Amino acid sequence: MMFRRLSANLRAQNWALAAIELAIVILGVFIGIEAANWNQARQERQETRQLLSQLQAELTTFHGFLEELDDYYATTRRYAAKADAGWRGERSVSDREFVIAAYQASQVNAAGNNSAVWAQIFGAQDLRNIEDLKLRSNLARLMAFDYDLVNLSAVTTPYRQEVRKVIPDRIQEAIRKHCGDRRAPGSVYALDLPADCPIDLPGEDVAAAAAGLRGNPELRAELRWHMAAVANQMLNVETLRILLRDLTAQIRQS
């Protein structure tokens, strides 16, 4: 109807009315575009809030998993201390305890995550839709975090490799079977390492393995380097945990 009147006014050379009606058409188109853009922006903000809610659950789960790394590495540190005592020749550490401790000290755990996971959950476009600058900045930090610092690559040290070359396969298999990594109770991802390993091993095999370990005294230095790598990994894990705590609190308040 509006276009027919506009066309009629143009044919009649009624320029004033034509200009008014043209202005109304342009204004209507502009308002329609703005309304569509506003509605799209509103939908995007709503989707972003939903994604943040889902992300909060993921962050909480991941933070809980990182907390459990403390217990895991507390166990490997105790094994490392016993293995070191075995290399020093302390009589309180039997050959069986020495061999088991030397192996268990090489056990490692990791964050098991990477930036691609967060990018898949929360894409760059969704990140731009976050109005809270601090929240957006911290989420970007999480997505850009160097996860190699907290994953297995950070603790796959020469000690872990070399000590397993010395200990016979059958002893390693027995330790893994009875005292290796276990799924932590109530957790989908976290691993638990038994604090003790009271298993029987053939005496001759144990004596030979202990002699092989003592015949490689450089492994004691490698063990110290390995535990330093673990400590560095856990320092980066703590940095990541702080970031996760802050993010979770910010999302809850947003």
Image (cartoon, grey):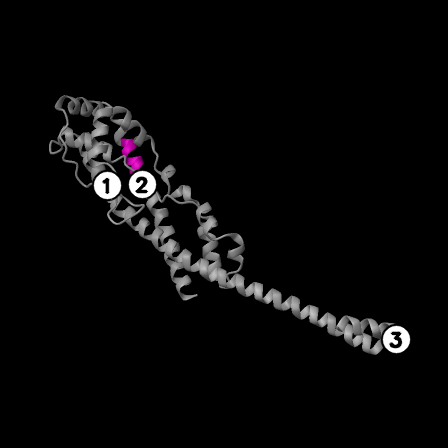
Q: Range of the magenta residues?
A: 221-229
Q: Residue at label 1?
A: 193
- Residue 208 image point, x, y percent: 18, 21
The residue beneath circle 3 is 12
- Which of disc 1 and disc 2 is earlier in sequence? 2
62 lies above or below 171: below
Amino acid found under the numbered disc labelled 2: Asn
Is residue 217 visible in the rendered structure shown here?
Answer: yes
17 or 62: nearer the viewer: 17
- Tag 3 and tag 2, C-beta contact below 8 Å: no
Tell me the CA gap for discs 1 and 3. Answer: 91 Å
Where residue 148 appears, as percent x and y from the top left, is 41, 41
Element at label 2? loop
Instruction: Indicate which disc residue 134 carries.
Output: none
Label the magenta part by its dominant secondary structure.
helix
Asked if marks 2 and 1 touch (Cβ < 8 Å), the reply is: yes
Q: Name the element at disc 1.
A: loop
Q: CA distance from mark 3 to mark 2?
A: 84 Å
Figure quadrant of residue 182: top left
Crowd around label 3: few <14 · some 14–19 · many ≥20 (10 Å): few
